[in-house]
Each structure stands twice: as C-alpha cells, then as structure tokens.
Amino acid sequence: MASNFSYWLLGLTLAASLGAAERAQADDVPSLKGRRIGITVVGTEHYWDLRAYQGQIDEVKRLGGVAIALDAGRNDSRQISQIQTLIAQKPDAIVEQLGNGPVLQPWLRKIRGAGIPLFTVDTISPSSINDTTSDNYGIGEKLALQLASDIHGRGNILVFNGFYSVPVCAIRYDELKLVLKAFPDIHIIQPELRDVIPNTVQNAYSQVTDMLQKYPNKGQIAAVWSAWDVPQVGATQAIIAAHRPEVRTYGVDGSPDVVKMVADPTSPAAAVAAQQPYLIGKTAIDNVARYLAGNHDLPPYTFVPSILVNKENAKTAGSQLGQS
C-alpha cells in the first residue's frame, strides 16, 4: 500500500491532472475494433462496483472491442488467479478495478512485466498507466466539512474504518482526520467501528445499535461516518429503529437508495458524496483506447466529478447522477 506521504504527493498533482483529464475527455475516442481488453474487478455486489464494471464492458463493446471481464466475488485469491488467467491470454490491455492494495501490487507489476498495458479504476499503483477515479481528496474533505457544519463543530462521532488497505477509503479517512484537526470539540469514539464484507448492512446495523445502547442519551452521539455508503444504510436503519433521529449519518458513493434516504427530510441520512461510477468505468476504457491508438501522453490520473448530496440538493441530485 502506498504511504500517506504518497497520497499527499498525489493530491498535489490533482489540479494539473483535472485539467489534462478535461482536455482528454474532449477528444474523439478511437476504435477498439480487433482489440481484446481484460477487465478484473474484486467484486460487483455494491452499486458502485457494478456500475463501474458495467461501464467498462459497455464501452469496450461500443468501441468495437472484445471485453474479457472477470468478477472475483470479493475474494482476493480468486482475483489473483483471474489476473494470472488474463496475463496468460495476453489481451491488448488490462483494467483492474478496486481491491486490496498490498495484495494486488505484486500482480499489477507482473501485468506490466508481461508487456501488457495496465489501467486501473480506483486503484493507486505505480504500475498503472492511468487511474480513473473520483477526486477522493475533495470527497473526503467536503463530506467531513458537511458533517462538522451539521453538528455545529461539536460532538462525538462513530467512524467505520474497516478497509484502510483500500487506497480510496484511506484517502477519505485521512481527509476526515485532517478536517477534524480544525474542530477540537469533535471527537471520534474509540475503538473505531469495523465495516465488513459480506453482510455489511446487517453488521453495521448491529454495531450501531450496540453503540446507541451504550450511549443512550441524546447528545452523546452526534453522527456516524463511513468511507462508503453501504454501512451508512445499516447505521441509518439502526438510528431509526432506536428512535434517535438527532444522530446523522454520512457516507460515500451515492447509491440510489442512499440518495433517496438523504432526500427524505425525516431520515437521519444527512449527506452522501455521490460518485459517477458508470462514467468512471467508461472513461477508463476511453483512456485505454487512446493509449492503444498511440496517445502515450495520458495523465497518470483522470478525475471524474462527484456531487455532494445533502438535504438541500438531494431532490434534484438524482437526475444529475442519471438515477431515475
């Protein structure tokens, strides 16, 4: 896994990369006719994962190529095996989506060592030619600032921190901690909660229910934060069941069910940083097509815009995100 210092350095390149990405998006996308593109994803049970994966498959087909798409079902060993299979098939390029950073890095190096161009989606790796992702630095900062503003800079919060080995989750968590340095009256209740896969919603519900019983009085818990929005669903359900509407929830990704929860004025779901996963997947393949057509001057990162959905804009955000 990259160090926190590495994440900081990546953040410094953000403005320049955003400009380069916007210029790249304006270009015509070359054909992938006759090209085979390998796609490996750690899992697709989550809305974000599935939409980004589908965006890649659809775009390869739209551009005339053949997608060799493999879903590891949230199993690291299976994803490694699938990467080995893709390397043996020698496609024209491979796109890897999400996964456990420390586990993946040696295998991503093997892809490049085999002479296969590697592109990533939400995976920071020195082996990747281009990583297509959201600006997770901005996402983490804006979500943390929304939380701090909503609770008026004071209170105890629960934090889910179960996937720090996934670089985008680490970035969002680090940005939360950085923002909270400016709010000394906001405290993270220890020990931090651990989100899990599978049964994420049920597990989050159980953990938050236990904490609400441990801190039964109004004002003892102000908010619940998670690096993605599936734990947010379980946390919100637990808060409703416990009749503790003063506790607000926050998350990242913007699954349609969570956007609807935020839009409900009576729901404890206060905000979700909504990404555009289908567009992220499509954009990754567009970058592959440009590279294979001879454009080797791609930026190392392509940042796709996200929308911070809160109580004020939630009713219109769904249409902006292409959600019915």
Image (spheres, rainbow, N blue to C red):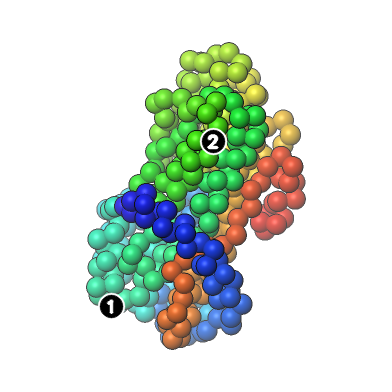
Residue 115 tag number: 1
Residue type (three-letter) at the residue carrying disc 1: Gly
202 vs 7, nearest the viewer = 7
Q: Residue 307, how many percent across, how many down?
A: 64, 52
Q: Is residue 299 rendered to the left or right of residue 82?
A: right
Q: Residue 266, how many percent across, how many down?
A: 72, 30
Residue 182 tag number: 2
10 Å crowding of disc 2: few (<14), some (14-19), many (20+): few
Which of the 4 image quadrants contains residue 87?
A: bottom left
* Residue 53 visible in the shown view: no
CB under 8 Å between callouts 2 and 1? no
Q: Residue at x 70, y 51 (%)?
A: 317
- State which quarter of the image contains the C terminus: bottom right
Q: Residue at x 38, y 43 (%)?
A: 164
Total tally of numbered discs in the picture: 2
10 Å crowding of disc 1: few (<14), some (14-19), many (20+): few
Q: CA distance from mark 2 to mark 1?
A: 47 Å
Which of the 4 image quadrants contains residue 151?
A: top right
Q: Residue at x 51, y 84 (%)?
A: 31
Q: Residue 251, how many percent across, how many down?
A: 55, 41
Q: Secondary structure at mark 1?
A: loop
Q: Is residue 3 rendered to the left or right of residue 220?
A: left
